[in-house]
Amino acid sequence: MLAEASGESVCVSAIGLDIDQELCDRASQDFPGIEFICGDVLSIATREHGGEGDDPIARCMERLDIAQFDAICCFSVLMYVHLNGGDEGLRRVLDYLCSKGAFLILELQSWKKYRDQVRRLKRDAGQIYPKYEQLEWRGGCGALEQHIKFHIQSNGFELVAESAEKNEFERQVIFFRKKCETGPEQLNT
């Protein structure tokens, strides 16, 4: 479609990341034109801030000889990053995503979904998320989502659009674009 619209030959690549190698293997079979790599985005982002570990995303970018991705989509993961990594873990992941892409498409889960997940883990596995009680980025009526939006905007992104309604899983989808830097030569034109 892109080639038809532009009238030129366009090379489009897609890369998927998942924490579960089995899911990556299954996705590779179902979508052979997409590369799937296994990795934990929380661990990867922590590594970026001096932690230990491997960064399969950076390796992939080096192999493709790209400085950043055109677009990054992050669905069904930020709540788990937040519950497992706390506020600081979520900030590090958001910073990492902002550093790697020009356009972000994120699916946010409401505070109600967090509470439901915490209850489910306690009920089904008898476990808790140890950082849950210390979360400062919390709150219903969109307060949690506002913390995330403001943080991304503080990384030089502008909010382009957000879904008016939540999707079938009661999650909002938001779209951000990295702001263009305006140099002095552009101000005089």
Image (cartoon, rainbow, N blue to C red):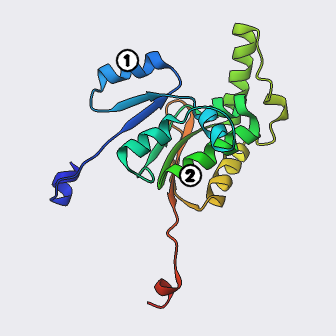
Question: What's the CA distance linking mark 2 and mark 1?
Answer: 28 Å
Residue type, numbered disc 1? Arg
For label 2, the SS is: helix
Q: Residue at x 70, y 38 (%)?
A: 89
Determine which residue is flagged by label 2: 98
Vertical comparison of 16 with 62: above or below: above
Q: Residues within 10 Å of mark 2 (few under 14, many from 20)?
A: many
Q: How many marks?
A: 2
Label annotation for residue 160: none
Vertical comparison of 33 with 69: above or below: above
**Residue 116 percent coordinates (x, y):** 70, 23
**Residue 99 percent coordinates (x, y):** 55, 52
Q: Nearer the viewer, residue 48 or 168?
A: 48
Residue type, numbered disc 2? Cys
Determine which residue is flagged by label 1: 26
Name the N-terminal-most of marks 2 and 1.
1
Q: Is residue 24 left or right of residue 109?
A: left
